[in-house]
Image (cartoon, rainbow, N blue to C red):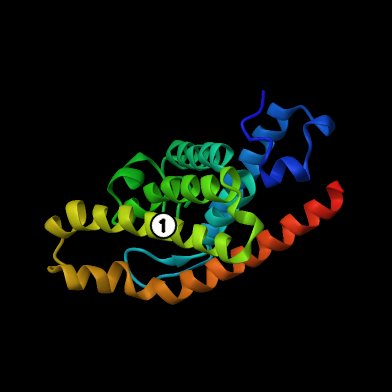
Amino acid sequence: MSIASSSSLVSGLIPEQRLNALTRDIGLILVGSCLLALSAQFKVPVGPVPISLQSLVVLLIGAVYGWRLGAATIFAYWVEGIALGGLMPWFANGSGLAYFIGAPSAGFLWGFMAMVVVVGFLADTLRWRENALALFAAMMIGQVALYVIGLAHAYLLVLPVVTWMNTTPEMLQIYLTPFIVGDLLKTALATLVVIQGWQWVERRLR
């Protein structure tokens, strides 16, 4: 039994013949969730939502793992962060159920699931990873999915109850504007890494 689809990039890198598929997938989930936690610690505190490397890692997980294994990895990351109960900052600025539900940046944490599913489905199932422009487009669509959920959370659940922002333009200045350039660069970098990885796998499988 395998969580990852047979067409995923990771299945080409680590074929089932070399390792029990479920064992391989569980190991990859643990590696992916730990990398995501580590990337959360490389951050620039620009407000309630810090600039971090997390979205870069989520893009890579989606494109390499595919949507099913990618979704399982994000879910594991959530469970691990909630289980820590504030003992260490597994998420960008904390951990525990209260942080997962009530942090001003929680919407972006939830949005990682939509991002990884969108990128994984387009890159793996529809095979957009085989063309750099198509893969870049898939990752940009994933970025949009992340923004939609993050901004919806901020507008519906944060804006009405805080005093440090009062209007929608103020919310966009805090939750959107500081991230656009960096996210474009991270998307381009993730595209380059995955395209190079896919070409290497293709050569290896010939």
Q: In which quadrant of the rendered image does the N terminus lie? A: top right
Q: Position of residue 206 (x, y in %)?
A: 87, 48
Q: Residue at x 16, y 67 (%)?
A: 168
Q: Position of residue 147 (x, y in %)?
A: 35, 59
Of residue 95 and residue 177, the one placed in the foreground of this image is 177
Of residue 83 and residue 51, the one placed in the foreground of this image is 51
Amino acid type, callout 1:
Asn
Q: Is residue 160 above or below residue 101?
A: below
Of residue 1 and residue 75, the one placed in the foreground of this image is 1
The residue lying furthest to the top in this view is 1
Q: Residue at x 66, y 43 (%)?
A: 8
Of residue 16 and residue 97, the one placed in the foreground of this image is 16
Label 1 secondary element:
loop
Q: Is residue 136 above or below residue 96?
A: below
Q: Residue at x 41, y 57 (%)?
A: 93
Tally of numbered discs? 1
Circle 1 sits on which residue? 93
Judge the density around disc 1: few (<14), some (14-19), many (≥20) Cα neighbours within 10 Å. some
Q: Position of residue 200 (x, y in %)?
A: 80, 57
Q: Is residue 139 above or below residue 26?
A: below
Q: Is residue 135 above or below residue 69?
A: below
**Residue 76 as seen in the image, left or right of residue 20:** left
Location of residue 151 by image quarter: bottom left
Q: Position of residue 80 (x, y in %)?
A: 50, 39
Q: Residue at x 38, y 54 (%)?
A: 145
